[in-house]
């Protein structure tokens, strides 16, 4: 059902936990649907110096969170905003179709964390233009992804 | 790594004695039971002996037991067959919300065809109310179908009392006994049952074979049309190895029933107690005593069932869950919803169903593993640190 990479990230998740005095925190998903993802970021000179996550959800939700933190660690904020769920899926070696929304959740949680950082610091980022944190959170809407 | 199977309600391994009984019917005694020659007559003899054996274990005459392709077929046949054959009496059927999909989806099909179905609620332990059942009966009611033992939470319905109500109102009573056979003493007369569904692979028999008990005098239409097998009621060349295996499994289950119930009940209670005592924020589902002897169903707060199953599997333990992620839909199982669990609790459900090959050591290992795995997942969960004050 899952690739070896998914299982590795699920069994040995990278960057689990919290960052004290994080510069941005993003939480998406909802408890009714069975998955909630929270991402913490530490930003220095526009670079994401540290990133951690906490996730309530299935194996692929945890794996997607883990692999997303690996992708994003050390990126500039603008580059991080360009990371898509497709990259998360690719890094995991693929996800079953019913689990695609887990990768969307990871992308959204990151965006929400950067939005939090931007709002707190009165910053504007190209990748956040038109971003609405409330609208963006319903990950169970139909997700169109081309493979 | 040691592997521990705790998913006996999903299916069971075929016992060696069962397999030994079946094997000659693939090769030596391969005849078609409808044939006139010796090969056919040997098969016919085995078929009827098997029928008598199984019927005997449920206190039924041999000629009231019909072989089917499994439990789902038996459920389909009972409901569609009875409702269609008794249209002159009415079009209403009463069942309950926690039935197996073999019943629920059949009811949905019947509704599309113009039949009316009442789905009774269950209480927080999964029990139907006899008063509500009786109140749901109308002049157009033909049939009641209530499962014997629930496959997810193990709750055992008061079948004899339901049967009494059905008798009193002149209704036909069917029960899906797929999880009951081999786990509780069954007598169709004492239970006032008119039709009963069975499956062999839940009692250490082979997959793809089951049966339907049909009390004499019950009007029922055929589901599978064709040849004259099963006294013209269920067409198709008989699955002789399956039939023989089913009979052997039923015979063994019947002989060892008391010891089986005693052993499983002990292991079940030890497992539940171990989990509830060593994992905080956990809760047992289903009726505390009126339940399947091997069924354990527990919810762990703040974590999700599929993640739990994968983690347990990594420790060699095979279980199942009613979480949305394992049911393939966005909602947790209909059974967990029907007993009133909130979504977030139902997402963290785990079913461990014990069977004849489990041991006390395995049960203790499962508890130890659960403590570890649940802790690990909770440390990752943003819901848990809200409770633990950000620790």
Image (spheres, coloured by chain):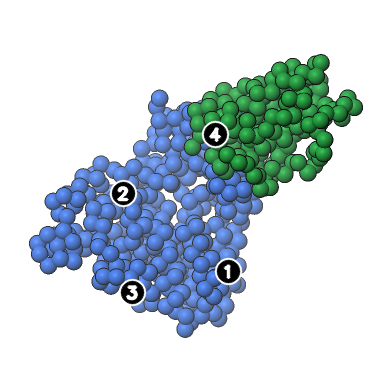
Chain colours: A green, B blue
Task: Output the chain of dot 3.
Answer: B
Specify few, some or many for label 4: CA neighbours under 10 Å numbering under 14, 14-19, or 20 or more: some
Calculate the distance from the C-alpha at mark 1 to the C-alpha at mark 2: 34 Å
**x, y (%) of residue A117?**
83, 26
Do discs 3 and 1 belong to a common subunit? yes
Gap in angstroms between the C-alphas marked 4 and 2: 38 Å
Q: Residue at x 44, y 41 (%)?
A: B7
Sequence order check: which comes first, mark 3 or mark 1? 1
- Foreground of the two, A104 or B203: A104
A121 versus B359 height, above or below:
above
Q: Quadrant of the N terminus of chain B?
A: top left
| A56 left or right, relative to B200 | right
Q: Which residue is mark 1?
A: B118
Residue to which mark 3 is pinned: B216
Between B331 and B97, the one lying in front of the other is B331
| Chain label for disc 1 | B
The one nearer the camera, A134 or B334, is A134
**Viewer-nearest of discs 4 and 3:** 4
Query: Can the viewer see residue B182 in this picture?
Result: yes
Pointers 4 and 1 in contact (CB under 8 A)?
no
Q: Residue at x 44, y 76 (%)?
A: B84
Side (left or right) of B237 relative to B378: left
Give the label on residue A94, or none: 4
Marks 1/2 in contact by CB < 8 Å: the verdict is no
Label 4 secondary element: loop
The residue under label 2 is: B205
Indicate left or right for A46 with B134 as reference: right
**x and y percentages locating residue B2 in the rendered image:** 39, 27
Return the disc, 1 or 2, that comes first in the chain's sequence: 1
User: In the image, which is nearer the foreground, mark 3 or mark 2?
Assistant: 2
What distance separates the C-alpha of mark 3 from that of mark 1?
Answer: 26 Å
């Amino acid at each position: 059902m899952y690739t070896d990479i998914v299982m590795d990230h699920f069994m040995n998740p990278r960057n689990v936990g919290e960052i004290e005095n994080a510069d941005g925190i993003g939480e998406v998903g909802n408890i009714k649907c069975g998955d909630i993802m929270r991402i913490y970021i530490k930003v220095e000179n526009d670079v994401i110096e540290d990133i951690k996550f906490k996730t309530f959800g299935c194996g692929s939700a945890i794996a997607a969170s883990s692999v997303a933190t690996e992708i994003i660690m050390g990126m500039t904020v603008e580059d991080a905003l360009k990371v898509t769920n497709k990259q998360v899926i690719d890094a995991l070696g693929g996800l079953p179709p019913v689990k695609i929304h887990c990768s969307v959740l990871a992308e959204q949680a990151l965006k929400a964390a950067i939005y939090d950082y931007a709002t707190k610091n009165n910053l504007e980022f190209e990748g956040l233009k038109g971003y609405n944190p409330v609208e963006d959170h319903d990950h169970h809407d139909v997700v169109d992804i081309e493979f | 790594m040691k592997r521990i199977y705790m998913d006996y309600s999903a299916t069971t391994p075929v016992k060696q004695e069962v397999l030994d009984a079946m094997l000659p019917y693939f090769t030596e005694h391969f005849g078609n039971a409808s044939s006139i020659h010796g090969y056919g007559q040997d098969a016919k003899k085995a078929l009827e002996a098997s029928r008598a054996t199984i019927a005997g274990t449920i206190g039924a005459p041999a000629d009231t037991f019909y072989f089917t392709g499994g439990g789902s077929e038996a459920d389909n046949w009972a409901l569609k067959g009875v409702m269609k054959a008794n249209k002159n009496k009415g079009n209403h059927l009463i069942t309950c919300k926690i039935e197996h999909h073999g019943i629920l989806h059949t009811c949905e099909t019947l509704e599309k065809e113009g039949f009316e179905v009442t789905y009774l609620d269950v209480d927080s332990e999964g029990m139907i109310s006899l008063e509500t059942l009786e109140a749901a009966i109308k002049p157009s009611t033909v049939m009641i179908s209530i499962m014997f033992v629930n496959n997810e939470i193990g709750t055992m319905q008061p079948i004899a009392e339901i049967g009494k109500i059905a008798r009193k109102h002149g209704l036909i009573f069917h029960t899906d006994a797929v999880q009951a056979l081999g786990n509780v003493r069954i007598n169709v007369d004492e239970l006032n049952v008119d039709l009963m569904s069975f499956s062999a692979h839940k009692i250490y028999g082979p997959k793809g074979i089951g049966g339907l008990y049909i009390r004499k005098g019950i009007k029922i239409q055929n589901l599978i049309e064709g040849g004259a097998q099963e006294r013209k009621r269920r067409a198709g060349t008989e699955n002789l190895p399956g039939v023989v295996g089913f009979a052997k499994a039923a015979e063994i289950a019947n002989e060892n029933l008391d010891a089986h119930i005693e052993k499983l009940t002990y292991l079940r209670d030890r497992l539940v107690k171990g989990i509830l005592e060593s994992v905080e924020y956990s809760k047992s589902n289903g009726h505390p005593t009126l339940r399947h002897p091997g069924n354990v169903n527990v919810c762990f707060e703040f974590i999700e069932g599929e993640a739990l199953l994968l983690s347990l599997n990594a420790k060699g333990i095979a279980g199942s869950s009613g979480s949305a992620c394992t049911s393939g839909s966005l909602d947790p199982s209909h059974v967990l919803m029907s007993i009133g669990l909130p979504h977030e609790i139902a997402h963290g459900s785990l079913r461990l169903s014990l069977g004849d090959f489990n041991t006390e050591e395995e049960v203790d290992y499962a508890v130890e593993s659960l403590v570890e795995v649940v802790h690990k997942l909770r440390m990752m969960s943003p819901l848990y640190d809200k409770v633990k004050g950000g620790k």
